């Protein structure tokens, strides 16, 4: 990594962001999941969201080019899920409680919010892909606090984990 790339990463780490897990299923029925922090709303009408995913990510084709995906917004109680889905394990869902959503993607239990999406478009963005999806179904919790990333560490509102 060049000095400029290192400085860029350090500068961006000063932007606090929520932590999500994107799940998707390939045409053969295999489920994939990946931890992301580059997620945001794009439009209210129609309801669109986007996330960015590295081109070397395991499950890239299912998550970035498949017909559907789900975004699971993690709570501060779900740090372990962020770690599980950040790894390159074969079966990340082995010890994870989930249901299958209407779009066939896995919905992780206990999340602050879940959004089931139909993929609208995927764009090139340097070493990442930018995935835009239309929100078809959503659910959210009445309480709880988000899991955050700031300066390369997990955080919660009010302090470090």
Image (tube, rainbow, N blue to C red):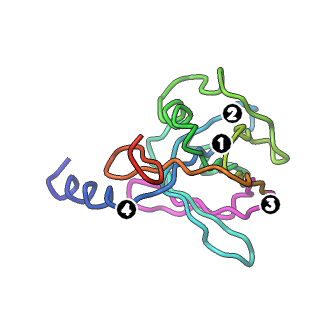
Q: Are marks 2 and 3 in contact (CB under 8 Å)?
A: no
Q: Are marks 1 and 3 in contact (CB under 8 Å)?
A: no
Q: Quadrant of the C terminus?
A: top left
Q: Residues within 10 Å of mark 2 (few under 14, many from 20)?
A: some
Question: What residue sits right under mark 3 in the picture?
Answer: 136
* Mark earlier in primary sequence (1, 2): 1
- Closer to viewer: mark 4 or mark 2: 4
Judged from the image, the secondary structure of the residue bearing numbered disc 4 is loop
Judged from the image, the secondary structure of the residue bearing numbered disc 3 is strand
Question: What residue sits right under mark 4 in the picture?
Answer: 15
Judged from the image, the secondary structure of the residue bearing numbered disc 2 is strand
Q: For the point 52% across and 24% down, which residue is it?
A: 89
Q: Are marks 4 and 2 in contact (CB under 8 Å)?
A: no
Q: Position of residue 128 (x, y in %)?
A: 44, 54
The image shows residue 123, relative to residue 33, as above or below, that is: below
**Main SS of the magenta segment?**
strand
Question: What residue sits right under mark 1 in the picture?
Answer: 23
Residues in magenta? Answer: 116-137
Question: What residue sits right under mark 2 in the picture?
Answer: 31
Q: Residues within 10 Å of mark 1 (few under 14, many from 20)?
A: many
Image-based side of 128 in relation to 50, left or right: left
Q: Residues within 10 Å of mark 4 (few under 14, many from 20)?
A: few
Count of marks placed on residues? 4
Q: For the point 69% across and 64% down, which residue is it?
A: 120
């Amino acid at each position: 990594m060049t000095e400029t790339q290192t400085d860029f990463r350090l500068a961006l780490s000063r932007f606090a962001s929520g932590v999500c897990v994107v799940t998707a299923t390939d045409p053969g029925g295999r489920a994939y999941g990946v931890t992301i922090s580059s997620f945001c709303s794009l439009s209210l009408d129609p309801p669109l969201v986007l996330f960015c995913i590295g081109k070397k990510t395991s499950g890239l084709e299912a998550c970035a080019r498949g017909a559907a995906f789900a975004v699971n917004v993690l709570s501060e109680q779900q740090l372990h899920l962020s770690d599980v889905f950040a790894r390159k394990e074969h079966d990340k869902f082995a010890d994870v409680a989930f249901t299958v959503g209407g779009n066939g993607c896995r919905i992780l239990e206990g999340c602050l919010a879940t959004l089931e999406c139909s993929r609208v478009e995927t764009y090139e963005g340097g070493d990442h892909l930018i995935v835009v999806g239309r929100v078809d179904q959503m659910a959210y919790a009445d309480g709880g606090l988000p899991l955050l990333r700031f300066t390369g560490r997990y955080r919660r509102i009010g302090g470090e984990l």
